[in-house]
Image (cartoon, rainbow, N blue to C red):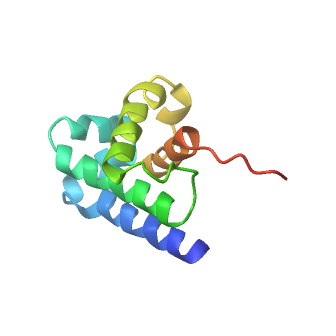
Amino acid sequence: MKTPLLAALGISAAMLLGATGPASATDLKSLSGFLASCQTDTLQCEAIVSDIVVAAKTNHYACMPRNLTTDEAASKEMRWLETSAKSNPQFAKMDLQDVLWDGVSDLWPCNKKV
């Protein structure tokens, strides 16, 4: 189960680092850089967030409702990034990949018994 998740992470990381070329790659490593780039390149932002959502659903990383579409989940994740994550100083210091995964965990937690 970890192999597909790692592959999805690798794909998303490759998109973050190479989708728009080396000049903007550094801008997409932080939440603030990512959100700023979303103002001008919404398609890339949607693709990155959608990839995280698909990877989470595919690998059962989060407990998303079955009837929640990828587009709906990605929109919800974007709203979370723009509100909850943006206003929390903890996320300003984190790598964007980690913030994206924290969003999935926060939005669709699994109540697992230990």
Identified at 46% across, 46% down, the residue is 100
Q: Nearer the viewer, residue 94 or 79?
A: 79
Q: Nearer the viewer, residue 61 or 91?
A: 61
Q: Is residue 36 left or right of residue 57?
A: left
Residue 29, percent from left and from top: 38, 48
Q: Quadrant of the N terminus?
A: bottom right
Residue extending farthest to the front is: 67
Residue 63, percent from left and from top: 58, 51
Residue extending farthest to the bottom is: 3
Q: Can you tell which quarter of the image residue 53 is in?
A: bottom left
Residue 39, percent from left and from top: 19, 35
Q: Above or below — where is 110 with respect to 5?
A: above
Number of numbered callouts drawn: 0
Identified at 52% across, 26% down, the residue is 89
Residue 99, percent from left and from top: 49, 43
Identified at 26% across, 63% down, the residue is 18
